[in-house]
Image: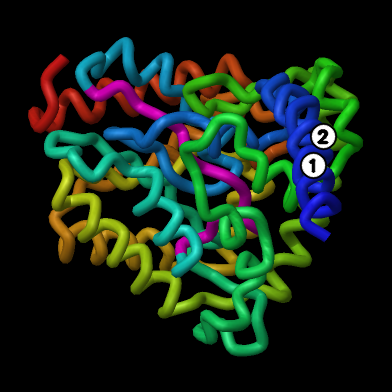
Amino acid sequence: MKRFLLHSALFLGLLAIPVYWLFSQADGHADPFYLRFTTPEQKSLVLGTSRAAQGIRPDALNQQLPEANFYNYSFTIMHSPYGPVYYESIRKKLDPETKEGVFILSVDPWSISSRSEDPNDEGDFFENKRALANTHWVAQKPNVAYLLQNYEGSYYELFEEKPEMFLHDDGWLEITIKMLPNMVRGRIKRKVKAYTKHSENYRFSETRLDYLKKIISHLQEKGDVYLVRLPISKEIMEIENGFMPDFNKKILELSKEKGCPFLDMTPHNDRYIYTDGNHLYKDSALEASEQIGKWIQGMNNVKP
């Protein structure tokens, strides 16, 4: 019996070596999230859903605020709306020694809403069964647990480049797709259809707003917090105005309550280019991020 156990342990150990090597090859082409769980704990974070993941570029922010050294820890509307799961993951990703961090929280109506029957029942939040909930180690390379639990493709695909998607080491998700006018119109049409459905199924969640407040309070112990509403296309803007017409009022009240500045970029929606109406094209993401950096500079809280 002892010999069997010894041989089994040896076999498993030998098997683990090539598996570990394979997983160590995963890079920014692996999937839209993986690298965010392999990088070290961070001192300055960009937070939000996919709008922030694609639309706020740490490289541009760092040009304006080099002392901050931003990291984009944003995911999607399905993974990182404000709530208990995101709150705990943020706590894990934040370096506990942080004292002068800078935190940019992207906000929109969907990030404080839920499609649960009871929008305030955190036990029924859809992110509870997704990657942020089951990834307990968020600064481990390679992150074997994440790849075993959450990687959806074949592991051989870890070696393959995905030309449309690349997750940078600073957490920014770069999307490279054709921007021919007819293609963009088609993507906007599909996104409008999806968000029209969202507006029918989602409802404002006091619980999510409370967790946003909780996240802000925690981060304010480590540095300065800024709220940003990213620009979107006029079509998506119309849907959001119908879904939550008092959204800006809610955020302005939150801004006043918590003492954190709020930048609403939607008055300048027509200034930017979008891949699908909901996400900024990467060149516009650069421009928007530069504007955010300059705005933070203007607050005189952080000096370059």
177 lies left or right of 35: right
What number is the disc on residue 12?
1
Marks 1 and 2, Cα distance to the nearest angstrom? Answer: 5 Å
250 lies left or right of 145: left
Element class at badge 1: helix
Q: Amino acid at mark 1?
A: Leu
Q: Is residue 49 visible?
A: yes
Residue 106: percent from left, percent from top: 43, 46
What number is the disc on residue 15?
2
Q: Main secondary structure of the magenta part?
A: loop
Q: Badges 1 and 2: C-beta atoms under 8 Å apart? A: yes
Residue 186: percent from left, percent from top: 88, 36
Whether 102 is drawn above or below 151: the answer is above
Tell me the residue at 15%/26% (across/down). 298
Residue 236 is a magenta residue: no
Whether 95 is drawn above or below 69: the answer is below
138 lies left or right of 302: right
Tell me the residue at 77%/56% (across/down). 2
**The image quarter in which residue 28 lies:** top right
Q: Amino acid at mark 2?
A: Leu
Query: Looking at the rendering, in which quadrant would you find the C terminus?
Result: top left
Query: Looking at the rendering, in which quadrant would you find the N terminus?
Result: bottom right
Residue 215: percent from left, percent from top: 31, 59
Q: Which residues are magenta?
A: 68-82
The 10 Å Cα crowd at callout 1, few under 14, some 14 to 19, many 20 or more, is few
Residue 174: percent from left, percent from top: 64, 22
What number is the disc on residue 159?
none
Tell me the residue at 40%/60% (across/down). 87
